[in-house]
Image (cartoon, rainbow, N blue to C red):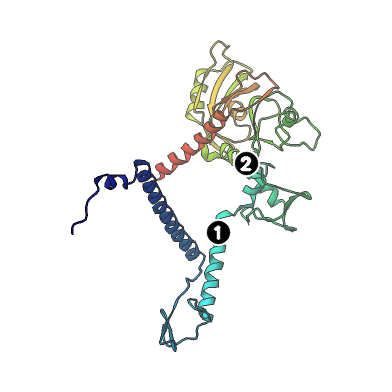
Amino acid sequence: MKQRTDNFSKFANQKKGSAIKEAFRQEKKKQKAAAQAEGEAIRRKKIEKAQGILPEKKATFRNDKKVKFNNQRGPQKPVAYGTYRPTAEESKVSKKRTENHDQASADLTSMPLNKFIAHCGVCGRREAADLIKQGKITVNGDIIYEPGYKVTGNEKVSMGGKTLHLKHNLVYILLNKPKDFITTTRDPEGRKTVLELVKAATPERVYPVGRLDRNTTGVLLITNDGELAQQLTHPSFEVKKIYEVTLDKPVVAKHLEQLLQGITLEDGFVKADAAGFAEGHPKNVIGIEIHSGKNRIVRRMFEHLGYEVKGLDRVMFANLTKKNVERGKWRLLQEKEVRLLKFMNQSFIRKTAAEKK
């Protein structure tokens, strides 16, 4: 006998639209969870492999009597179902792999001692190297004389009996330096330093980037960012500096040409990137652009040509100007200015690398 078909029941027993959607969502949720679990297992295996951890090898039992392990010859005695005890040789290899991995991890996080000191806000890298060579730095109580000595930050690094710590609160100050201030953190002769002018700017320990003579005025950057200080002062980065020079007499045109073509001083050849008369000023006021970081280079260039420098004002340093900053005053750099400083140096690195190819 044929069973009667109840058309109403056929439709009434079907799932509603919301139920179908909910079932679909639950199915997708299960699939997503399974994919995540599989991905996590793969990542865990990669980590264990990098650390030299051997995977567990499961035992295969035959007739509950003889036991043979995967990748092993001959019967072995099981220590627990589904686990494997490595041989002494395998344990030795695994330990060696772990030690190598730990050493590789340490190498990735270590840095030269002079770089560590710069990041502590003491000074720039070159000044830090000098401190190390003078025997003023100890690591875990031992005096270190090599600037390239590797540290990880877990050591006790000290200077003058004080422990140094990495700086995380970076500060960038632009100062319009006046005359009669020394561009150092301290002066043995008791003369005034530029840090006295910015002591209200931050409680962090900061230092000047590069040097300006006692009687040279203008733009000076003060920071505790050792990495940026290293880039801005290293000769290979060719950071642009523009000075306004006031001389004892008018400059003749041929001497401007000599500056542009280059002159030889006692410490080598040097030339200006640009030089010319300052607009709206008498002929004894010259504008000069130069990237050399040699000591007192602008003064020595003009003295070589027979001029006496009466006034020297740095109007630009690495695209920073003293605009709206009065003499002896300071301001904090804006985030955009800091980014531009760092981008400028990264651009130079890429450009240099391309030129070498």
Q: Secondary structure at mark 1?
A: helix
Report the amino acid beneath label 1: Ser
- Quadrant of residue 315 within the rendered picture: top right
Residue 226 in view in this figure: yes
Residue closest to the far left: 1
Q: Residues within 10 Å of mark 1 (few under 14, many from 20)?
A: few
Which residue appears at 65% of the width and 55% of the height? 146
Compared to 231, does 318 lie above or below? Answer: above
Residue at mark 1 to residue at mark 2: CA–CA distance: 24 Å
Residue 256: where, in percent of width, then height? 51, 22
Which residue appears at 66% of the width and 43% of the height? 167
Residue 63: where, in percent of width, then height? 40, 87
Q: Of residues 131 and 189, which is closer to you in this image?
A: 131
Residue 152: where, in percent of width, then height? 63, 55
Residue 117: where, in percent of width, then height? 67, 47
Q: Of residues 171 and 17, which is closer to you in this image?
A: 17
Residue 136 in view in this figure: no
Report the amino acid beneath label 2: Gly
Q: Are marks 1 and 2 in contact (CB under 8 Å)?
A: no
Closer mark to the observer between disc 1 and disc 2 = 1
Compared to 207, does 70 lie above or below? Answer: below
Direction from residue 56 to residue 17 in the image, left or right? left
- Mark 2 highlights which residue? 226
- Mark 1 highlights which residue? 105
Q: Earlier in the sequence, mark 1 or mark 2?
A: 1
- Quadrant of residue 42 within the rendered picture: bottom left
Which residue appears at 70% of the width and 32% of the height? 183
Residue closest to the far right: 190
Q: Of residues 74 and 158, which is closer to you in this image?
A: 74
Residue closest to the far bottom: 65
